[in-house]
Amino acid sequence: MANGTWKIARRGNTQLPLVIVLALAVALVLLGRAQANLFDRARTVIIDRLQPVLVVAHAPVTQFDRWIGSINELFAVYRENLQLKDENARLKQWHNVAVVMQDRVKRYQLLLHAVPDPDVHSVLSQVIGRANRPFLQTMILDAGAANSAKPGEAVVDARGMIGRVYLTGQHTSWVILLTDLNSRIPVTVAPGNHQAIMVGDNTAMPTLDTMSQTVTLHAGDQVVSSGDGGLLPPGLPIGTVVGQAGQYRVALLADGASAQDVEILAFRRPPEELPADVQNQLPAVAAGLKPAAPPPPAPADAPVLPAQAAAARGTSTKPAAPKVTKPAPDVTAAAQQAAPGTSETPADGADQDR
C-alpha cells in the first residue's frame, strides 16, 4: 500500500506541473492578444533601468571603433599628404614657368607697343538661392545694382566660370547657369584656337557647336571664353572637351549646384568715339606738329620775276643751251673752181639735168 501511495503521488507530481505550464501558456497568449503593447512597455522599462549599465558596457566598444577608425584615417591622410606634395611640386614648376612667360609677354608687349588688356573689376557675393526648373537653371546672388552688378557680366568661382547675370535688382542678381537651355556663349578651344559656341541643354555637360565643319577636336582640349562681343573677358576657364555619342561636350570645371562664394566680373570696353573732324586726325596733327601755312598771295602791282612766272607756268628757269647750226655750202665758190677747167662742165650739168 505504501508502494501504491508512492506511485499515486509520483503520478500526481508528474502531471501537476504540465497542467500548470499549459494554463500559464494559454493565459500568456490571451494576455498578449488582449494587450499587445504590454510587453513593449515592459521591455522599455527594463531598458531604462539598465541604461547606465549599457552605457558603461558600450563605452569600450565605441572607443575601440574610434581607435580603429583613427588608424584608417591616419593612413588615408598619409596617402593624401603624399599626393598633395607631388601636386604641390608640379604646381610650383608650372608657377615658375608662368612667371617667366608673363615677364616675356610683358616685354614683347612693350616692344610691339601692344594695347594693354582692359582692367577687370570683381564684386564678391554669396549664393542665397537656387532654382532648378525643367527649363530654367538659375541661382540668386546677394549683390545687385547697388554693388555695380549689371546684366551680361560673367560669374566665376575659384574653379572657373559658372554663368552670366541676366537680371539685376537693387540688392540681388539672377544668374543663368552655363548648363541652362538658354545659355549660349562664344568659346575658344585650345590648342588650335578653334572658335565655337557652347550651348546648354539642361544636362551636366553643355554641347559645342564649332564654327567650321572641318575642325577636329580631341578629348582633353581646354575650353575658355573667347571674349567675342565684348561682354565676357577672354581667357576665363570653363572646362575640357569630352567626346560623347559622336558629339563634342564640355565637362565644366565649376559646379553651380555646390558653389557658395562667387565673383561678378565687371568687364566693359569703352565705346570708341568717331572723330568729329578728319583734319584733326592727320599724322602731323596727332604728333603735335602744325601744318605748314600756304605762302601769302603777291600784290597785283608787284613786278613778276622770271622765276615766279616760270613757277606759275610749271616750267624751269634754267637758261637754254645755245643752238649750233651748220653753215650752208657756198655754191658760187664751187662754180668758180669748176670754170677754169674744161668747157664741158655745163654740158655735163645739162646731161645730169636730163
Image: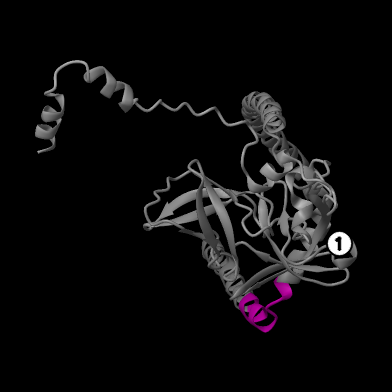
Q: Does the magenta stretch include residue 324?
A: no
The majority secondary structure of the magenta stretch comes to helix
Which image quadrant for residue 334?
top left
Which image quadrant for residue 60?
top right
Q: Position of residue 98 (x, y in %)?
A: 66, 29
- Residue type at the position of mark 1: Ser
Q: Is residue 38 magenta?
A: yes
User: Looking at the picture, does residue 208 appear above or below residue 12?
Assistant: above
Q: Tell me the residue at 11%/28% (across/down).
A: 348
Q: Tell me the residue at 46%/58% (across/down).
A: 211
Seen in the image, is 331 located left or right of residue 194? left
User: Looking at the picture, does residue 37 appear above or below residue 303?
Assistant: below
State the quadrant of the C terminus: top left
Q: Tell me the residue at 79%/61% (across/down).
A: 276
Q: Tell me the residue at 72%/51% (across/down).
A: 157
Secondary structure at badge 1 equals loop
Q: Where is residue 158 in the image (x, y as percent from the top left)?
A: 72, 46
Report the magenta residues as a range: 27-39
Q: Position of residue 134 (x, y in %)?
A: 59, 76
Seen in the image, is 241 located left or right of residue 33? left
Q: Which of 130 and 36 is in front in this view?
A: 130
User: Looking at the picture, does residue 94 appear above or below residue 58?
Assistant: above
Q: Name the residue under label 1.
A: 148
Furthest toward the right, the residue is 146
Decide if residue 264 is in sight here.
no
Seen in the image, is 251 located left or right of residue 255? left
Q: Which of 323 and 102 is in front in this view?
A: 323
